[in-house]
Amino acid sequence: MAKRIINVSVTSDLLCPFCFIGKRSLEKAIRACPDLDVRVRWHPFLLDPTQTDKPEDRQERLARKFGGLERVAIMQQRLQRRGEHDGLPFQWNGEIASSLPAHQLIDYAGNAAHQGDHIKQNAVVESLFHSYFEQGKTPNDISMLLDAAEAGGLNRQDVKTYLSRGENADQVQSEAQNASRRGIRGVPHFVIEHKHVISGAQDPEAFIEALRDIASDNSTKQDASKCDANSC
């Protein structure tokens, strides 16, 4: 018997640690539902549209945004504990820059997802999160982006050419802006078969419940939003 296909749309930003945590929660839920064919599609969100392509110290930028290094340290300590629980060894040093090029790459990989190979886009997203949050790489570094492309089974030279032309930059930026207009105020934001909305990096159980509810064909539209302490 063919597995029941369930589509999940995820709106996220590479710069958001909760998005990496939320990805892990979703993956645990998918593994807990082996009888389902869960297909994940990633969509852009820009946490800080004012962030430029020029790299700058990550901690200094966050200190200006959140009101000082002391507040940033408290936030990161909490995230460190949460990350360790999910097997994510966050490290916070390095540089920050616009995540738009990363979203362009994810969109490019999504073209393969439209053809039924959603695994490629997921692999690209995983590599980007790993490089930024676990290796301290700069989010718009071309070598990092091309490594992520290869991790997703994409042609390195084709991707380099595509990114250098900036062909989809306006389209990706517009989609990110539309997410805000649709009422998405924080990420990660998950929509499962247009019926369940899960906001924030919730525990796997929340995703399992939504997947099972939809698989049973008994679901109605539900919103399980928790944007305060589990999202960016």
Image: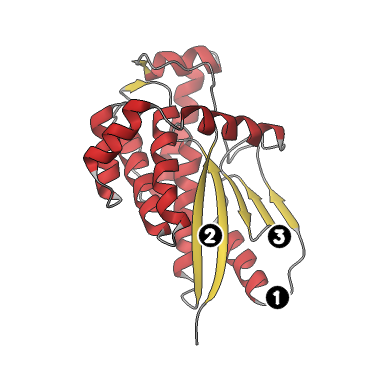
Quickly name the residue at label 2.
204
Q: In this view, does 99 lie above or below 39?
A: above
Q: Which of marks 3 and 1 is nearer the N terminus?
A: 3
Taking 181 as reference, is 116 left or right?
Answer: left
- Kind of residue at disc 1: Asp
* Crowd tier of the residue under label 2, counting other residues whose Cα lies within 10 Å: few below 14, some 14–19, many 20 or above: some
Name the amino acid type tagged 3: Lys
Q: What element carries label 1?
A: loop
To which residue does mark 3 refer? Answer: 195
Mark 1, residue position:
217
Q: Residue at x 27, y 52 (%)?
A: 153
Q: Mark 1: give few (<14), some (14-19) or many (20+) Cα within 10 Å.
A: few
First of labels 2, 3 by sequence position: 3
Residue 33 location in percent, x, y? Answer: 50, 73
Q: Quadrant of the C terminus?
A: top right
Q: What colouring does the structure picture have?
A: secondary structure
Q: Which residue appears farthest toward the bottom when viewing the image?
A: 1
Front-lying residue, 139 or 92? 139
Residue 196 or residue 170, whichever sits in front: 170
Dot 3 falls on a residue whose secondary structure is: loop
Labels 3 & 1 near each other (Cβ < 8 A): no
Does residue 102 sit above or below 82 in this rendering?
above
Q: Can residue 86 be seen in this view?
A: no
Q: Where is residue 109 in the image (x, y as percent from the top left)?
A: 39, 47
Q: Check disc 2 and give the amino acid type.
A: Pro
For discs 2 and 3, the disc positioned in front in the rendered view? 3
